[in-house]
Amino acid sequence: TPREAVYAHLRADPNIQALVGQRVYHVTPPTGATYPLIIINTISNVDRRDLAAVFSTDTRLQITVMADSLKEAETIALAVRRSLEGFQGLLAGALPVLGCRTDGYTPIYDEDTGQTHYHVDFILTHKEAV
């Protein structure tokens, strides 16, 4: 799936590893996970059709960076954007990507916990996985 390809891509990116190690998770972090970390969620899939059939799919993914400070969350969110923005080719050796673009990014500070969650939305235009 696109989520799995992005997961593998981010975990293999040395710039991401330097910031969060292997703390990249699907949907929700495990209980007791330490910060900073990244969570990947699929928001939607929309098929793009030509006259004959589905040509490609636009998958909207939300990548959430969870950190103890706004500065740390911003640094990691920027590294995620640099890793994915404009990507074309075979993502994680499995997903033929025609294009990837940032569709928005929003920091949210939780006063109760003192943590920052930085949401970055991407639209990944792709063919079916190889």
Image (spheres, rainbow, N blue to C red):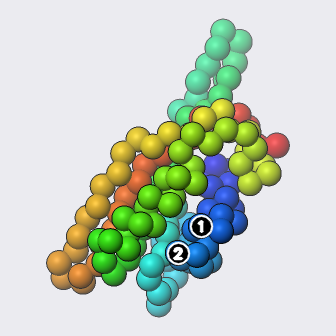
Foreground pick, 52 / 113: 113
| Mark 2 crowdedness (10 Å alpha carbons): few <14, some 14-19, many ≥20 | some
Callout 2 amino acid: Leu
Residue 67 sits in quarter: bottom left
Write the residue at 65% across / 68% down: 14
Callout 1 amino acid: Asn
Residue found at the very far bottom of the displayed protein: 32
Q: Which residue is mark 1?
A: 15
47 in relation to 29, above or below: above
| Mark 1 crowdedness (10 Å alpha carbons): few <14, some 14-19, many ≥20 | some
Q: Are marks 2 and 1 in contact (CB under 8 Å)?
A: yes
Structural distance between the alpha carbons of marks 2 and 1 = 7 Å
109 in relation to 30, above or below: above
Write the residue at 61% across / 73% down: 17
- Percent from the top left, x then y, of residue 12? 69, 66
Foreground pick, 108 / 85: 85
- Percent from the top left, x then y, of residue 4? 66, 58
Q: What secondary structure is marked by label 2?
A: helix
Question: Is residue 11 among what the camera can see?
Answer: no
Q: Which residue is mark 2?
A: 19
82 in relation to 11, above or below: above
- Percent from the top left, x then y, of residue 81? 49, 53
Write the residue at 41% across / 66% down: 75
- Percent from the top left, x then y, of residue 6? 62, 55
Question: Is residue 110 among what the camera can see?
Answer: yes
Q: Disc count in the image?
A: 2
